[in-house]
Amino acid sequence: MLKKIMFHSFYQKYFADGLSRQMKELFWSTAILDFAVSAVGIFEPIYLYTLGFSIQWIILFFIAVYALYFFLAPLGGKIARMHGYEHSILYSTPFLILYYLSLFAIPYHPIFIGTAVVALGLQKMLYWPGYHADFARFGADGARGKEISNLIVLDSLVVVLGPVFGGIVIATLGFKFLFVIVAALILFSNIPLLLTPEKFEPVPFSYKDAMKRLVKKENRRRLFAFIGFGEEHIAGYLWPIFIFLIIKEYFSVGLVVSASVAVAIILTLYIGRISDGAARREVLKIGVAFTFFTWFMRILVVSGLGIFMMNSLYLISRRAMAVPFMAITYEDAKKTSVMQSIIFLQMALVIGKILVSVLALVALYFFPNSWLAIFILGALMTLLYALL
């Protein structure tokens, strides 16, 4: 009896109760999709690097993706508003599969670089507006911190397995088999969204107004705060190459990344709990400060153990920032216009990723092969989060 009471008390403190149907479907769909993406995601820039792409060309590849996405994002908002948030997510899956198939085909013909760029831009156009709008619309006020942290924990549990799984498949069967497996899992991630029909009333969405909102004076502070997401671009596409240069083995890369994700899981629950209280903005400030310092400390990393420790610290610090940051963003979106707020977030985020990419190219031009310059850039972008 005592154990049941203790478990119930623990559950109430750290887990969101009474999730809506839409949130449950989103949770499971995201978990399956993130397992698939995590199995290959950490290896994407490494794959391009091993094909002979320089770091500068990898940066240019993703500049092209996000430049396309910037102009497509309002169209994604229009599609999500006209056809439904879950339908928009469903429509994105063929393009994600096409993206991975295009990556696989790049060694056979350069044209597949272009199809990969277009496919990923279209996937982002359809997926992210639907995903964030679904979360903002159907999440529970007063429990958003828990909901976000619970989703991160669920994702983390599958992401712990994803990189190890991907590393094993690459080491034994190669990238080709991994891309095929990932494509099948992406299709499977649609099943939770198809369990119940989506009830949705079409609403118009203005492309022109979405562009105008970016330059309005009253949105300037929030714009620059969202531009801070440029630092996660470095973490997602340049940091994995640095890891590979240190460790040099696919399986070991996957193992180290998975282990660091596992370390961050428990603390994420606590972060979610306190992010629903009065300390939300204090947690955000602490998260920004520690994330800032993790970027500077990376230059000291020279071994697999250092990678593990630094990646663990970064994940914990960034989640301390991201959970309250997104909770504030979703609540503000629900108070105004969900889709307008989400498209503003996505377009500002893209500006940040393009900006940090251009600055990285400039830094590498003046300081060739300098990881210190890249890490300093990541640290400076992190400071923008504090503007929220």
Image (tube, rainbow, N blue to C red):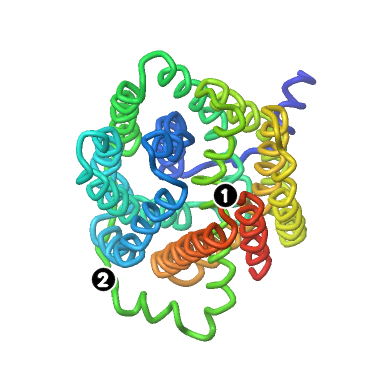
Is residue 261 or residue 369 the one in the foreground?
369
Question: Is residue 245 at least partly visible in the picture?
Answer: yes
Whether the residues at callouts 1 and 2 have beta carbons within 8 Å, the answer is no
Is residue 319 or residue 249 the one in the foreground?
249
Of pointers 1 and 2, the one earlier in the residue sequence: 2
Residue at 23% of width from left, 44% of height from top?
110
Q: State which quadrant residue 306 falls in.
A: top right
The image quadrant where one finds the N terminus is top right
Residue 74 rendering spot, x and y as whole percentages: 32, 67
Amino acid carrying mark 1 in the image: Asn
Which SS class for mark 1?
loop
Above or below residue 208? Residue 370 is above
Above or below residue 219? Residue 304 is above
| Left or right of 388 on screen, residue 133 | left
Q: State which quadrant residue 182 falls in.
A: top left
Question: Is residue 13 at least partly visible in the picture?
Answer: no
Residue placed under numbered mark 2 in the picture? 204
For marks 1 and 2, give the CA distance: 48 Å
Residue 356 rendering spot, x and y as whole percentages: 52, 62
Residue 249 rendering spot, x and y as whole percentages: 53, 23
Amino acid carrying mark 2 in the image: Pro
Q: Residues within 10 Å of mark 1 (few under 14, many from 20)?
A: few
Residue farthest along the right direction in this orientation: 2
Above or below residue 75? Residue 105 is above
Residue at 26% of width from left, 38% of height from top?
106
Residue at 26% of width from left, 34% of height from top?
107
| Left or right of 280 on screen, residue 109 | left
Checking the image for residue 261, the label placed there is: none
Residue placed under numbered mark 1 in the picture? 369
Residue at 66% of width from left, 52% of height from top?
372
